[in-house]
Amino acid sequence: MPSSSKKLKYTFTIRIHKDVTKYTDIIKPDILSSPEWAQYTKTNIDSKYGTGKIFLSPAQPNTPEWKGLLATLSKNVAQASDNVYSKALIIFRLKNSHTHRFASISIGYGDSIIDRKTVVNDFGKVVAAKTIKDDKMRAVDTTEITDVILQSSRQIVGAKINGTRSILGSRSEFPRSIRGTIKNGSTEIELVGNNDSLKVTRLMSLDEIAGDLDFYVEAYENKNLPQAEWSTRFSEVKDTTLKNTLFLEFANSVLAGNDFAIAWPYLTEDADYKITGIQKNDEIIQGDLATAYKDAIGKKAYTSKQLVDKFHRDSLINVNVNQVLMSVKIVKSLIGDLVFQNERYLLFNGTWFLVSSNFFKDIKDEFDNVVISCLPFIPTKNGESEENYNGMLNISLNRNNFPCREIHPDLFRDPTFARSGVEPADLVTENLEFIYIKKGTSSANLSHLFLQGQVAASLISANIDMRKFVAKKGFGSHWLNDTTRKNDIKIVFGIIKKNHDLPFFSMISFVEVIRNIKNMDFQVQLAWIDGQ
């Protein structure tokens, strides 16, 4: 048995807990009420190491899955022994913490003892983000949430120059785990911050453990340490009961007609899609995937439980240009947001994330601060196509002394940029408003709208041929030429939508586009167009 003062290399997985007043609050209620609980070893930690308790389960038998395979192939000669394991949880009560935190260290399968509702779900990421310096960052596992391209979990290794802040391309991308090294005094410590858990590896003596826990919790609670904001944008929901509840609430939201999206959850080339579990599921879906799925749902009277089961049963099938099929369950392709018990959650790739209230406020404030266009947009008629609306709006604006030209459906073609051509705008006005209009009834339409404006702006910014093309279709070279200042041009997004709002996942995409266009020195405006 090693001496407590001898330095050895230890690896601990640490969590901190909330809403607890005693040690057993951290244990799952079903374990506390089970007959097995009486067989657990429960003992105090030796006071020279700190204040706390240890909970150790009785030995648990575990038959290897491959035991039968070996026995069969060897005619019972190769008889593997059953494994035996235990579950242990070490819980410290930290006296130096401002909030008198409880911190746990799981040993073996000790994670399975913990009541997840008590776990602070951003502890690991925040500590790593606050304490690992840029030149000590080793790897970051990130996820990007966007309904345009879904990029699930890319790992970036060797972020030694500018750290994670230079890695995260947009506010829709966030770290799920952060790896690197720090120093506490002269001691080098390896950290892996993974949502709620902090995995720590260092050379130490056991009498240093309580002080180390205080160090990590102090870093978590310290509001003055930098690099924390981006790490707390989203936190993965781990509690099974809460996840199941969120799925039921989300199903209720879908049945009530609220917005959601369906998208292929991996980077992919252009492809067609089918969905199983809906009428004509052997046919390629034309149009928005979520709209097709919503239409199929509306034809049957589902309960929320039945709809959740359907999410897990149905599949999204990717059909590439070579007719190779790939599929994922619908639950893995859903994107949606939900407010539940005053908290906002985001569903992405089958995983629920808690959205930071500060992050939501920042996005919402930026969205709400977009200038509303003063142009007199007319409402749409029931069932009217976007093309017909553009024509009627063109007539209306001209009649009301807002000289206007319709550009759509003419495309600007530049072989160095896009084979299919770029839509410069739906309409332009003599006052240099470039208007882009889409129905806000689907995520795909909104994505198309945002990208149309951003791509066109980038070409107007840098491509004189694009300016000449638009000038010819619009009001001539005196109106738009290579000397026209970008700050005089207004990119106007017109969204046809009964309710003047966007789902949060679309709002994130829109705010990113707004920032990109403003960074090019254009003005950005928004117009809500009444309609279906």
Image (cartoon, rainbow, N blue to C red):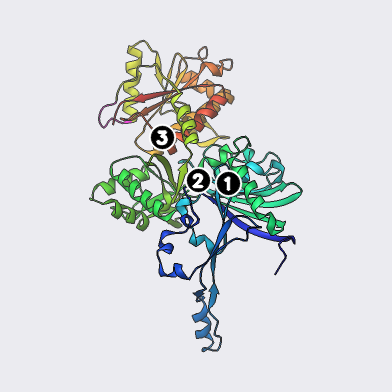
Majority secondary structure of the magenta segment?
loop
- CB within 8 Å, label 2 to label 1: yes
Q: Which residues are magenta?
A: 380-385
Label 3 amino acid? Leu
* Image location of residue 381, percent across then percent down: 26, 27
Eyeballing the image, is 302 above or below 147?
below
Kindly identify the residue that appears in the image at 46 percent across and 46 percent down.
353
On whether residue 383 falls in the magenta region, the answer is: yes
Name the disc covering residue 235, or none.
Answer: 2
Place of residue 512 in the rendered image (x, y in percent of width and height, measured from the top left): 51, 32
Kindly indicate whether the residue at mark 3 contacts the one at mark 2 (C-beta within 8 angstroms).
no
Specify the label residue 446 is tagged with.
3
> Quick one: 462 or 195, which is closer to the camera?
195
**Which one is nearer the viewer's eye here, 55 or 501?**
55
Q: Secondary structure at mark 3?
A: helix
Going from N to C along the chain, the mark reached first, 2 or 1, is 1
Q: Which quadrant holds residue 521? A: top right
Q: Is residue 130 left or right of residue 409?
A: right
Q: Position of residue 108 (x, y in %)?
A: 57, 65
Spatial CA span between label 2 and label 1:
9 Å
Q: Amino acid at mark 2?
A: Ser
The answer to whether 25 appears left or right of 154 in the picture is: left
Identify the residue position indicated by label 1 in the image.
125
Q: Residues within 10 Å of mark 1 (few under 14, many from 20)?
A: many
